[in-house]
Image (cartoon, helix red, strand yellow):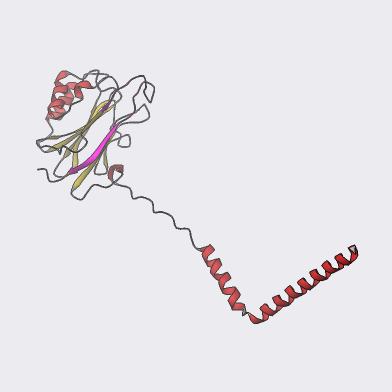
Amino acid sequence: MFVKQHLVKLAGLLLTSLVAWYLGSLFAVLIPKETITVPIANLEDIVKKPVLKAPVPKRQKCDHWSPCSPGNYAYRILSGGGTGRLAKICFEDDLLISEEKGNVGRGINIAIVNYKTGKVTSAQFFDMWKGDHSDEMVTFIKNAPEGSLLLMVTHDDGSTRLKDGAKKLVEELGSKEIQNVKFRSSWAFIAAKGFKLPDDIQKEKINHSDKNNRYGGWPAEIQIEGCIPRNLI
């Protein structure tokens, strides 16, 4: 009985194989070769097609996240942070003060821009740790023509030798924080001479050195940025 069952199973397996072989041969005769090769070719084309990638975001002026509207100036002021991160002042995608330009230094860095042309007319830094440069800074600011933008930022110490006369002058330009600048405070400020900037743009920011400093004895850098309409005067 056992042998008979195995013989039946073997016969069934042989019959199934024979039917499968016959049907395969029949399909090979009846189905055109092109019907099989075309889908395979289409599959190969799909595999070969390049994977679409999202376009790289376009770089904006002064590394803004979004562009300024037409008829506006772009600005960005970044304070220093530690010995390896020097201050930068950017206006209309031109670095007015930076390590790359070789004109950034310890103290208060100031760039003066002609508002009508959007071009820098003067840029200088004033060391407030060593030497007596506070009066020089006052003269520099007073010599800025009417219709100028003044962009200011600290690197390292901007307060130790900063005199009250210089603070008062910057305060008259609209600063609300110059009196609060301390040793190694990070401070950024933009002002207009002879006209008024819009109320809704970033004009000033300050960050003080404390026990939570990012760079040991240095506070984290800060920045202000924005867009200034070209039709204010």
On-image quarter of the N terminus: bottom right
Rendered position, 141 above or below 55: above
Residue 29 lies in the magenta stretch: no
Residue 225 lies in the magenta stretch: yes
Visible in this render: residue 183? yes
* For residue 40, side relative to residue 123 (left or right): right
Give the quadrant of residue 166. Answer: top left
Rendered position, 146 above or below 1: above
In the rendered picture of this protein, how many numbered marks are placed on residues?
A: 0
On-image quarter of the C terminus: top left
Q: Name which residue lies at 22% across and 36% down.
A: 202
Image location of residue 50, percent across then percent down: 48, 60
Q: Name which residue lies at 14% across and 22% down.
A: 168
Q: Name which residue lies at 23% across and 40% down.
A: 226
Image location of residue 180, percent across then percent down: 22, 21
Q: Name which residue lies at 60% across and 74% down.
A: 36
Give the quadrant of residue 167. Answer: top left
Rendered position, 160 above or below 44: above
Image location of residue 52, percent across then percent down: 45, 58
Question: Which is nearer the eye, 121 or 151?
Answer: 151
Question: Which is nearer the eye, 139 or 47?
Answer: 47
User: What range is drawn magenta here?
Assistant: 206-228
Image location of residue 97, percent across then percent down: 27, 35
Question: Which is nearer the eye, 144 or 192?
Answer: 192
Give the quadrant of residue 26. Answer: bottom right
- What secondary structure is the stretch in magenta mostly built from? loop
